[in-house]
Image (tube, rainbow, N blue to C red):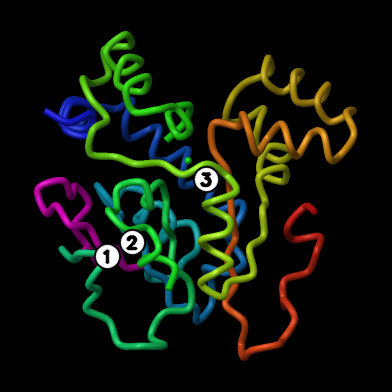
Amino acid sequence: MSAVGDRYERFTASDAYRSGRLRKATVIAHLCGPYLTGDARVIDLGAGTGIIRKALEMTTGNPIFGMEIDASFIVERERMTQADVLCLPLADQCVDVAILNHLYEHVPNPAVLFEGLPFLSWLPNDAASAYLRWTRRGTAYDDIQFLTYRPLAKLMRSAGFFVHDITERAIDDLIAQAWGRGWSRLWRGLRRTPDQARRSLLRTWSPQWFFLLERPAWPGVESSIPVEATGS
């Protein structure tokens, strides 16, 4: 059985799992809230159980639709549709914002999505699988593939997106709430290091990254997202 099957079939129905999904929804709402409200047409691709989609909908007051390839995995079924993200049943220009939360590594060809799972995102599959067995969270990561920072960023840029790395903003705003005081103290120490050194460290060793992708209105136009929104 795959790592996904091992882990999620065991924990999807648990209170701990739901609490984790709700915390993730809080992170997404904090970072992306202004883009999910009003008349924004929002879709959560690879929405899994639908717990995050529903929580974001309740937070923003805006209908958010979800798509998940495995119908048996869906828990919160309202506004959820079974669909393959590589062959979306959507017309062009019908979505303003798409949420991709730990999705690309599950897709055979991630480039199609653009035309990190914590800790495991940059480990070789053998090492990641060994870690899963050691922590009793699964047996194998054979069905998942990861990219390191530079290839992933290059992939997104080559698809024509402005790529805003908002990882530091996410850590600044949420580390104490999401990871606890110990990590918060460590981050305050890292914040004192030179910018380039700190960014290089995050790109190499961070367990996950946060990106805000912006499609230009037309070729040659500048980004419309203010610098202060990205934390750069």
Mark-to-mark CA distance, 3 and 2:
17 Å
Magenta highlight on residue 77: yes
State left or right for residue 174 relative to residue 186: left
- The amino acid pointed to by label 1 is Val
Residue drawn at x 65%, y 39% is 203
Q: Position of residue 88 (x, y in %)?
A: 25, 74
Across and down, in percent, residue 33 comes to: 58, 61
- Front residue (pair 79, 131): 131
- Dot 3 falls on a residue whose secondary structure is helix
Tell me the quadrant of the picture where the N terminus can be found: top left
Residue nearest the viewer, comparing 179 with 107 = 107
Label 2 sits on a secondary structure element that is strand
Q: Quadrant of residue 178?
A: top right
- Check contact, mark 1 vs mark 3: CB within 8 A: no
Mark nearer the viewer, 1 or 2: 1
Classify 79 as above or below 110.
below
> What type is the residue that disc 2 sits on?
Leu
For disc 1, the marked residue is: 85
Rendering coords of residue 79 (x, y %): 24, 67
- When asked about the image quadrant of residue 164, the answer is bottom right
Is the residue 205 above or below the residue 95 in the image?
Answer: above
Q: Residue at x 43, y 78 (%)?
A: 41
Quickly name the residue at label 2. 45
Q: Which residues are magenta?
A: 64-80
- Mark identifier at residue 215: none
The amino acid sitting under disc 3 is: Thr
Residue 26, labelled with which disc? 3
Give whichever of discs 3 and 2 has the lower sequence position. Answer: 3
**Neighbour class for label 3 at 10 Å: few (<14), some, many (≥20)?**
some
